[in-house]
């Protein structure tokens, strides 16, 4: 049943829903009802590109202060750009990937205000790229989303090719702010490529080990996530997702490419400050009655009944007289999650408080520089530092706070030159992604409850945590790209691109200091050691509650300080040619990757084609055949070494020194084996259609993935080197997926009754068959189970994550310029799916077999909305307030269940609110 929130929540809900198009007022007297014959050049270009379904990017300084004449909508792409740019000295240049950019002479710089929301009649929705290769969201489209925690995944919820986990985010853990994982076209969530200003920001240490499916307080593992850096969408100028027919310039993925670009400076001195907040006091937590007590008296991060999330940001930008653009942005998101320190409602006295606060904190600081001499030379630099610090504690334990640190710095230096025929781009990238842990003490002790150690629950008083660990994934690389202007050869036009790059990678795992974990006590009457000294660390004469006169530890796990490193180089080279012959475009490409860390060389052929049926861009048919190679991760190599850092010390008397105790070195539970790069073969077919003022985009993507990596149990390991539960990574994973996607949106906003309206309707049908969920599936894949009465191995079970069979999504935007209001809605329906619940054990042929039952999860739909009011102030200033509501109707949508009992069922987040206020100049 829902946890009832204060009435203030309903007041916010009323505000969020107050404005609708029906209440729009007409323009004041004297204000023209129709748009003028001319519009700003930048807006006209963007609107024309959106109307014709092509991507256009350019330096805003090139168009500021310029206007454009009206252009016939029936004009072709190149003809229309020429008409819009006539007399400006600018020209639209088509890149090899089918997108366009502007080149030309210097422009007169004028100061323009930094706008908070969308303006100039643009459609603030995702724009489809040529060849059906994906979509781009510009700054206006990103701002129009219900942003929530402000991560990339939230911004991509309207993308029909993207699927989300049913366990990452639920009503029980709404205080979390880490980025959600997502799958593109059915691929594993950790096989997407994430780029920030050209620098790779993937976590390739152990991306499948996340706090949701792992354990933050683990002896060896430090959980992270697929996105090594939590990118704040408020820092971005654009976000492009390539989900099919991906150009040859991108590699190292099986799903898709997420290319994030930071904002660049406009002219003059501008700035913005903003503040966002969300509170559990405003929100609903949906749970079954069986979970009520778990929520109300929670002592674990898995249940978060209270939280306060805050986000602050500031941006300052400008351009010097010499043309140097400078923009700096800082944001910090913090969540505070109060929890009980002890389970079972246990109360404490004295200095040991019973309420402790876990925190989550993301920080992003970026500086971007750009300069052009106006004659072809462009220089740029993007520097970013984005650390994450998540603080946990171990329940029922003293001095047990520890922090998980992730993220890190990235840098990108660029030098581009545009000549008469060629554009040459040089980029130097650096990133350092960490996943580390810090604790308060260099030991952990599990005492029996006694007068001196009286704080425990269930007979044990614990103190300390699992020690300090550092993990880093460092990359430094250079990339060269050459683009040629269209070259006419007979009746064909060729746009060539080739490039090459090299990248040095270093991964390491380091335990910073010796760490002692003391377990398993026995009774004693003395704490005097054999050398006459008194052991006051691992022995106590305080009488135990169980009746003992004293206790000593008879077993210690000693984790030694140590470090393991792996390093190597990666090389890449590619060539592609965008060939135009009449109404046809063919884009053959070839990519070569060499990795000396894994000693693998992979060749990826790429081919995309499009046919403009009538030559007017109204009906375009796309197709493609491609191969993509995925990544391998450091955990395969580092796991073996880190497990050998542990010694087990045993003694049978309190007088035995630990130096004299029996010592056993831990043997590895993972065996190294050669693995090949996983790959997927793809073919696609799609059509882009313009009709009735609408744009239709229909696409089919078929993928067959082979040699996927999974971890399996070894049946007969070498007993001298490995224990009885030994695993190895193999290429036995495989999957097949078929994905249909459809999106519909207007070519331009619809204007009526003083409002400006746009929408995007999208739907998908996804069929995925995969014999694993991730390479770190915890159960033994070769264990036998019984599913609905049928005996099989675990690897034969269907995957259970990111596999909703179909969904429908509707995004709408309404602007009421006269009132300064904008209203955005996002409706999503996700079809039901089949999962499994685990039951009792059954003995079959002398083997214990787990019984599993298929469980049908019903479909779910939600409505998210945001309402923003902007107030124009004198001297080009502006203030705004924004209210976001997620799950407006507070629907109870069951997301997952690990068993049949009500206490194992979890729901999608209930109604929740964000309030944002900001000021810009």
Image (cartoon, grey):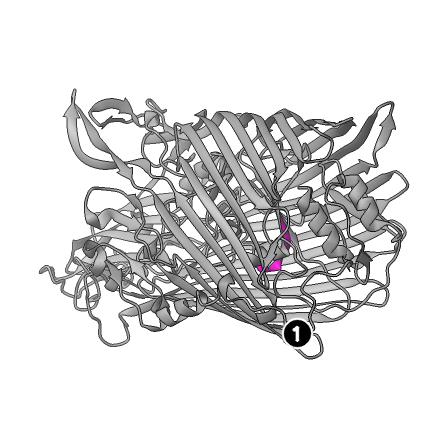
Residue 433 seen from this side: yes
**The one of 140 and 790 positioned closer to us in this rendering:** 140
* Location of residue 142 in the rendering, given as x and y in whole percent from the top left corner: 58, 55
Q: How many marks?
A: 1
- Whether residue 375 appears in magenta in the rendering, the answer is no
* Location of residue 236 in the rendering, given as x and y in whole percent from the top left corner: 62, 56
* Location of residue 805 in the rendering, given as x and y in whole percent from the top left corner: 40, 35
Q: Residue at x 85, y 45 (%)?
A: 418
Q: Where the C terminus falls, by quadrant?
A: bottom right
Residue, far bottom:
874
**The one of 714 and 56 positioned closer to us in this rendering:** 56
State whether residue 191 is above or below residue 349.
above
State whether residue 583 is above or below residue 123.
above
Q: Residue at x 55, y 28 (%)?
A: 677
Q: Residue at x 42, y 30 (%)?
A: 767
Left/right of residue 510 with respect to residue 893 in the rendered view: right
Residue for badge 1 = 29
Residue, far top:
845
Quarter of the rendering containing residue 373: bottom right
* Location of residue 186 in the rendering, given as x and y in whole percent from the top left corner: 47, 34
Q: Chief secondary structure of the magenta span? A: strand
**The one of 85 and 681 positioned closer to us in this rendering:** 85
10 Å crowding of disc 1: few (<14), some (14-19), many (20+): few
Quarter of the rendering containing residue 318: bottom right
Residue 251 seen from this side: no
State whether residue 119 is above or below residue 672.
below
Q: Where the N terminus falls, by quadrant?
A: bottom left
Residue, far left:
547
Judged from the image, the secondary structure of the residue bearing numbered disc 1 is loop
Q: Which residues are magenta?
A: 232-242
């Amino acid at each position: 049943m829902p946890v009832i929130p204060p009435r203030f929540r309903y007041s916010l809900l009323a505000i969020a829903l107050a404005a609708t198009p029906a209440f729009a007022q007409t323009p004041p007297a004297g204000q023209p009802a129709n748009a003028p014959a001319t519009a700003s050049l930048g807006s006209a270009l963007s609107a024309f590109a959106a109307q014709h379904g092509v991507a256009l990017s350019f330096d805003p300084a090139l168009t500021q202060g310029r206007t454009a004449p009206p252009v016939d909508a029936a004009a072709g792409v190149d003809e229309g750009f020429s008409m819009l740019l006539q007399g400006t000295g600018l020209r639209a240049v088509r890149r090899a990937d089918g997108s366009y950019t502007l080149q030309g002479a210097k422009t007169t710089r004028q100061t323009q205000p930094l706008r908070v929301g969308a303006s100039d009649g643009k459609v603030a929705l995702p724009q489809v790229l040529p060849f059906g290769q994906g979509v781009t969201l510009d700054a206006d489209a990103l701002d129009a989303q219900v942003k929530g925690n402000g991560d990339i995944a939230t911004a991509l919820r309207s993308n029909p090719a993207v699927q989300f986990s049913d366990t990452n985010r639920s009503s029980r853990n709404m205080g979390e702010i880490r980025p959600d994982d997502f799958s593109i076209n059915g691929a594993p969530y950790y096989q997407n490529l994430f780029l920030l200003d050209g620098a790779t920001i993937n976590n390739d240490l152990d991306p499948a080990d996340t706090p949701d499916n792992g354990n933050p307080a683990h002896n060896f593992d430090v959980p992270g996530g697929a996105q090594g850096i939590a990118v704040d969408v408020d820092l971005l100028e654009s976000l492009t997702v390539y989900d099919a027919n991906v150009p040859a310039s991108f590699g190292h993925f099986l799903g898709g490419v997420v290319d994030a670009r930071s904002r660049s400076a406009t002219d003059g001195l501008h700035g913005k400050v903003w503040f966002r907040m969300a509170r559990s006091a405003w929100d609903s937590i949906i749970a079954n009655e069986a979970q009520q007590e778990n929520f109300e008296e929670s002592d674990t991060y898995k249940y978060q009944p209270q939280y306060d999330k805050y986000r602050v940001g500031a941006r300052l930008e400008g351009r010097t007289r010499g043309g140097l653009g400078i923009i700096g942005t800082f944001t910090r998101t913090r969540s505070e999650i109060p929890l009980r320190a002890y389970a079972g409602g246990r109360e404490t006295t004295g200095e040991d408080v019973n309420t402790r606060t876990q925190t989550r904190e993301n920080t992003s600081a970026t500086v971007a520089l750009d300069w052009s001499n106006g004659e072809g030379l462009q220089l740029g630099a993007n520097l970013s530092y984005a650390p994450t610090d998540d603080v946990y504690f171990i329940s029922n334990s003293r001095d047990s706070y520890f922090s998980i640190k992730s993220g890190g710095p990235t840098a990108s230096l660029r030098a581009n030159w545009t000549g008469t025929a060629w554009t040459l781009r040089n980029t130097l990238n650096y990133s350092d992604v960490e996943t580390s842990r810090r604790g308060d003490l260099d030991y952990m002790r599990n005492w029996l409850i006694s007068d001196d150690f009286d704080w425990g629950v269930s007979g044990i008083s614990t103190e300390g945590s699992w020690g300090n660990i550092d993990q880093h994934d460092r990359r430094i690389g250079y990339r060269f790209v050459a683009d040629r202007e269209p070259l006419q050869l007979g009746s064909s036009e060729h746009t060539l691109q080739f490039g090459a790059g090299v990248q040095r990678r270093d991964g390491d795992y380091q335990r910073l200091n010796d760490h002692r974990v003391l377990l398993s006590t026995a009774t004693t009457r003395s704490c005097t050691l054999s050398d006459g000294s008194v052991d006051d660390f691992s022995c106590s004469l305080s009488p135990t509650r169980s009746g003992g006169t004293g206790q000593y530890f008879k077993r210690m796990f000693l984790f030694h300080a140590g470090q393991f490193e792996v390093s190597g180089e990666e090389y890449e080279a590619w060539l592609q040619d965008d060939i135009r012959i009449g109404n046809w475009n063919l884009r053959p490409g070839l990519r070569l990757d060499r990795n000396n860390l894994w000693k693998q060389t992979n060749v990826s052929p790429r081919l995309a084609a499009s046919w403009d049926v009538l030559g007017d861009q109204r009906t375009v048919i796309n197709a493609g055949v491609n191969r993509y190679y995925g990544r391998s991760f450091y955990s395969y190599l580092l796991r073996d070494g880190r497990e050998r850092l542990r010694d087990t010390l045993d003694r049978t008397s309190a007088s035995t020194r630990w130096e004299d105790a029996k010592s056993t070195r831990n043997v590895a539970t993972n065996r190294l084996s050669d693995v090949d790069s996983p790959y997927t073969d793809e073919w696609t077919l799609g059509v882009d259609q313009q009709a009735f003022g609408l744009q239709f985009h229909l696409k089919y993507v078929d993928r067959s993935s082979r040699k996927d990596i999974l971890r399996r149990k070894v049946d007969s390991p070498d007993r001298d080197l490995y224990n009885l539960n030994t695993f190895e990574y193999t290429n036995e994973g495989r999957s097949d997926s078929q994905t249909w996607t459809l999106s519909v949106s207007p070519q331009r906003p619809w204007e009526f009754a003083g409002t400006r309206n746009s929408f995007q309707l999208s739907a998908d049908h996804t069929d995925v068959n995969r014999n694993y969920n991730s390479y770190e599936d915890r159960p033994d894949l070769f264990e036998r189970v019984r599913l609905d009465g049928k005996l099989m191995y675990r690897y034969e079970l269907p995957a259970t994550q990111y596999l909703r069979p179909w969904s429908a999504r509707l995004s709408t935007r309404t602007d009421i310029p006269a009132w300064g209001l904008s209203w955005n809605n996002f409706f999503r329906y996700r079809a039901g799916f089949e999962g499994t619940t685990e039951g009792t054990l059954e003995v079959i042929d002398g083997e214990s077999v787990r019984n599993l039952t298929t469980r049908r999860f019903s479909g779910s739909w939600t409505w998210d909305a945001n309402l923003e009011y902007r107030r124009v102030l004198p001297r080009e200033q502006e203030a705004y307030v924004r209210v976001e509501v997620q799950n407006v109707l507070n629907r109870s949508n069951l997301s997952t269940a690990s068993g049949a009992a009500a206490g194992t069922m979890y729901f999608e987040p209930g109604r929740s609110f964000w309030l944002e206020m900001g000021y810009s100049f």
